[in-house]
Structure formats: structure tokens, C-alpha cells
Amino acid sequence: QVQLVESGGGLVQAGGSLRLSCAASGRTFSSVATGWFRQAPGKEREFVAAITWTGVMTYYTDSVKGRFTISRDNAKNTVYLQMNSLKPEDTAVYYCAASPTYFGPTLEKYYDWGQGTQVTVSS
């Protein structure tokens, strides 16, 4: 099992930037793929981005392509989500999740989850 703790959320104006961090402990973090998901009020949790165990491959939902970048530093057991050109519709609680066997957008295939960090983008 991997324990995940997100940080870096906050309030930012539209067009601004934030960098989220997902710090891991427990099972070797470098052996798992990691995804970022988000959940806005009244909506289902949705996929944002994912990165493979080695960091070589990444995958983004269409709405964040060109604005968000996922990366990882396995020496620090941390995955990052750099969010630029933020929009009010990016407002949500952002969660990171890990899977030892799956890389992709399917929420149900991620086993370990963090508690989330709030991102609020004002217009």
C-alpha cells in the first residue's frame, strides 16, 4: 500500500498558476503509476493526468492539455502537477492516486488515494 498526501492547493485568479505535490510513503513509489483526478462540487470525480512508473509516458485529459504538466521525482517520492493558465472551471478538489498495475484514466483501477487538496480559481 502507498500513502499519499497532496499539497499546494489554494486560491488563484484566472490565468494564474499553481503547482500541486503528491508525497508518497510506504511501498516503493517508483514502482507505481500515479494519476491526478479532480472533483468539483456536485460532479463526479474525473481524470486529469497520469504518469508511468518511470516518468517516460504521460497522459492528459483534453481539457488540460497544453496547460497542465505532470512530472515525478522518484528520489523524493513525489509527483507534481504544474497547472498554468488556470480557469474557473478548474476549481475542484484535486486528488492523487497510485496503481502498481495500471496506467491510464480509469478511476476504479487506482488503489491508493490521498485526501485531496482544494484548488479555487476566481474569475
Image: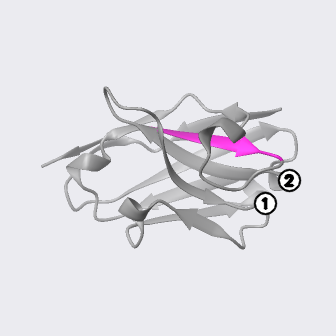
Q: Quadrant of the N terminus?
A: top right
Could you tell me the amino acid type at mark 1? Answer: Trp
Please tell me which residue lies in front, 35 or 20: 35
Q: How far apart are marks 1 and 2 (CA)?
A: 5 Å
Q: Tag 1: Cα neighbours inside 10 Å, few (<14), some, or many (≥20)? A: many
Q: In this picture, is 95 found above or below 17?
A: above
Percent x, y for residue 75?
A: 79, 59
Q: Residue 53: give its label.
A: 1
Q: In which quarter of the image is residue 62?
A: bottom left
Could you tell me the amino acid type at mark 2? Answer: Ser
In the rendered image, residue 97 lying in the magenta stretch gets the answer yes
Question: Mainly helix, strand or loop, the magenta region?
Answer: strand
> Residue drawn 62% across and 67% down?
58
Q: In this picture, is 42 found above or below 58?
A: above
Magenta segment boundaries in residue numbering: 94-100
Left or right of 19, for residue 115: right
Q: In this picture, is 123 found above or below 117?
A: below
Q: Can residue 87 be seen in this view?
A: yes
> In terms of secondary structure, where does tag 1 sit?
loop
In the rendered image, residue 99 lying in the magenta stretch gets the answer yes
Q: Do the residues labelled 1 and 2 touch (CB within 8 Å)?
A: yes
Q: Residue 15: give its label.
A: none
Disc 2 target residue: 31
Left or right of 14, for residue 95: right
Left or right of 18, for residue 88: left
Percent x, y for residue 18?
A: 38, 55
Percent x, y for residue 102?
A: 76, 51
